[in-house]
Image (cartoon, rainbow, N blue to C red):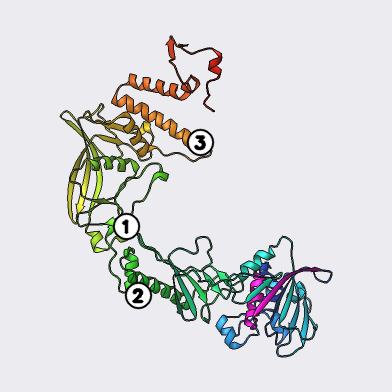
């Protein structure tokens, strides 16, 4: 067998599949024709919807550019026909015009540099190489290029034109009205030019509702551009407006994503460097340690993040109630506590409130790990709960349950305080501990209140709601209000039973039921006695006259 070599080529049959390169959407067609008009030096593009016997319903796109050198350039896949300099600057690939392949088109094009024009007719089959493209003489003194595209049903032509013109640098008129256009970086807080690209920096994410963050002469798309977020200070986001950049290329033929090449990597690094320079110039920052290191690697002189954290605030079992406190400066005596869930944090918070010489306690920010000031802070962790009754004591893990029954004489929260390599055990006395699984039910909770506690049934009920009530949003479950009412009633019964007696709990439940279900039916004034004898209910003092009917009901 002898060695041989050959060059890759595009098979002639490929032209038969050209219609599958594009989806024939009016958006792609407008983008391509507008780009061609701009490259041809047009100062205005006029778009009209027409409806007549010759073309039927169609869209007519007319520019006042320089016209065409040769009609064949439009129908040569991979050959753009533009100058070498322009093709290099804009990566013109000679493919976009085939967005018309599934529709066909009629074109009137000025012969460049003359007063003559061509009339070009190309059916969909002509684009696929199955029929010839017919070229004949067009009208005299025709300026630029006019393209007539058949309109398909259910197309929002007005919306497509408005979208295509938003950031297009040439005036666009649609059905007699000039379309609004603006600078793609118009709302940027900082703009720098880099290698033919305008980089705009924003402190609010401009892609929150529109993911397009790159503009190529009016064609917008989404790029994976970097962001720089801070914990407490302003974050940075970017948009890029490509002016003249030969090496930033788009994936062909659709041009809806960027090629990940060395130029793109360099662009990402340039954006990062701008972010870090702006951060350094702004004074104190709250960058993650990882981003801080990245900025210094890029040559930006950054100081460490300002020592500040959110003060510790317990979370609730009902997540919608949780709020983040603003960050505050952190001193050298501050400690960090990272809770394990709403039940644990509510227990610990009650113990903290009675800690007379408690240090300032803050929530962790793991993104700060690595900063010297952050790594030096002491850490607090819950290791268990302890109850003492008489001379007997019992200690359990936070999710466990006590075996000893009855109200204890003493309760303790057992904390481990880690300061560098030193570990200290801190015991905080408290009057209330609810042990059990996080987000568990009241039946799974082990509720302990010391004999000396002055907590009321109302306060205990609220504590149980804060620590355990987590409503379900399943469609088959009861409403939020109904779930809260059921949980609150059960928590109230448990609280009264524990702090007073079972009889008091029963009486409280009866009064609650009467207040909720009966009182609204009674007169607003006067006395009524409800008697229950052997489960037979009677009512005394309820007037049975016409005056009763006049009493306002609950609906009123």
* Picture disc at residue 366: 1
* Picture disc at residue 199: none
Quadrant assignment, res 107: bottom right
Q: Is residue 41 magenta?
A: yes
- Could you say whether the residue bearing mark 2 is in a helix, strand or loop? loop
Q: Tell me which numbered mark, 3 or 2, is placed earlier along the sequence.
A: 2
Q: Bounds of the magenta span?
A: 27-51
The x and y percentages for residue 195 are 47, 81
At 35% from the left and 75% from the top, the residue drawn is 298
Quadrant assignment, res 390: top left
Asked if the residue at tag 2 contacts the one at tag 3, i.e. Cβ–Cβ closer than 8 Å, the answer is no
Q: In the orientation shown, which residue stands out farthest toward the right? A: 53
Label 2 sits on residue: 298
For residue 489, side relative to residue 41 (left or right)? left
Label 3 sits on residue: 477
Q: Tell me which numbered mark, 3 or 1, is placed earlier along the sequence.
A: 1
């Amino acid at each position: 067998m002898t060695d041989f070599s050959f060059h890759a080529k595009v098979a002639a049959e490929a032209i038969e599949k050209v219609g599958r390169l594009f989806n024939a959407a009016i958006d792609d067609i407008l983008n391509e024709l507008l780009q061609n008009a701009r490259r041809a030096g047009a100062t205005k593009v006029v778009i009209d919807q027409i409806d007549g016997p010759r073309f039927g319903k169609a869209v007519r796109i007319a520019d006042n550019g320089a016209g065409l050198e040769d009609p064949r350039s439009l129908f040569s896949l991979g050959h753009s026909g533009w100058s070498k300099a322009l093709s290099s600057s804009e990566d013109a690939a000679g493919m976009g015009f085939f967005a018309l392949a599934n529709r066909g088109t009629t074109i009137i094009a000025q012969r460049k540099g003359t007063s003559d024009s061509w009339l070009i007719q190309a059916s969909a089959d002509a684009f696929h190489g199955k029929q010839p493209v017919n070229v004949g003489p067009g009208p005299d003194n025709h300026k630029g290029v006019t393209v007539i595209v058949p309109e398909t049903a259910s197309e929002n032509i007005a919306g497509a034109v408005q979208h295509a013109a938003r950031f297009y640098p040439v005036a666009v008129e649609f059905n007699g009205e000039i379309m609004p256009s603006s600078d793609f970086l118009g709302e940027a807080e900082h703009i720098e030019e880099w290698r033919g690209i305008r980089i705009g920096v924003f402190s609010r994410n401009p892609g929150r509702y529109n993911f397009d963050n790159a503009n190529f002469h009016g064609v917008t798309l989404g790029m994976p551009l970097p962001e720089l977020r801070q914990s407490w200070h302003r974050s940075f986001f970017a948009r890029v407006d490509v002016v003249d950049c030969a090496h930033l290329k788009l994936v062909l033929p659709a041009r809806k994503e960027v090629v990940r090449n060395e130029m793109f990597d360099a662009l990402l690094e340039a954006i990062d460097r701008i972010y870090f320079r702006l951060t350094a110039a702004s004074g104190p920052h709250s960058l993650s340690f990882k981003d801080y290191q990245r900025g210094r690697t890029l040559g930006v002189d950054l100081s460490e993040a300002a020592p500040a954290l959110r003060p510790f605030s317990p979370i609730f079992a009902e997540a919608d109630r949780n709020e983040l406190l603003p960050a505050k400066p952190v001193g050298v005596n501050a400690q960090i506590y990272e809770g394990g869930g709403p039940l644990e944090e509510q227990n610990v918070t009650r113990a903290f409130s009675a800690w007379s010489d408690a240090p300032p306690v803050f929530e962790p920010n793991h993104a700060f790990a690595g900063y010297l000031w952050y790594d030096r802070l002491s850490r607090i962790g819950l290791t268990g709960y302890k109850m003492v009754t008489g001379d007997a004591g019992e200690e359990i893990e936070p999710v466990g349950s006590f075996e000893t029954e009855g109200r204890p004489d003493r309760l303790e929260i057992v904390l481990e305080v880690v300061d560098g390599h030193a570990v200290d055990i801190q015991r905080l006395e408290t009057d209330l501990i609810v042990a059990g699984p996080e987000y568990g039910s009241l039946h799974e909770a082990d509720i302990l209140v010391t004999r000396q506690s002055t907590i009321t049934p109302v306060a205990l009920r609220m504590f149980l709601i804060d620590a355990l009530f987590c409503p379900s949003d399943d469609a088959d479950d009861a409403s939020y209000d109904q779930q809260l009412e059921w949980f609150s009633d059960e928590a109230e019964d448990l609280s009264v039973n524990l702090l007073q007696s079972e009889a008091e709990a029963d009486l409280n439940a009866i009064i609650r039921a009467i207040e909720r279900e009966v009182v609204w039916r009674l007169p607003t004034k006067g006395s009524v006695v409800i008697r229950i004898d052997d489960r037979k209910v009677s009512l005394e003092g309820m007037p049975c006259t016409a005056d009763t009917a006049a009493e306002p009901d609950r609906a009123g």
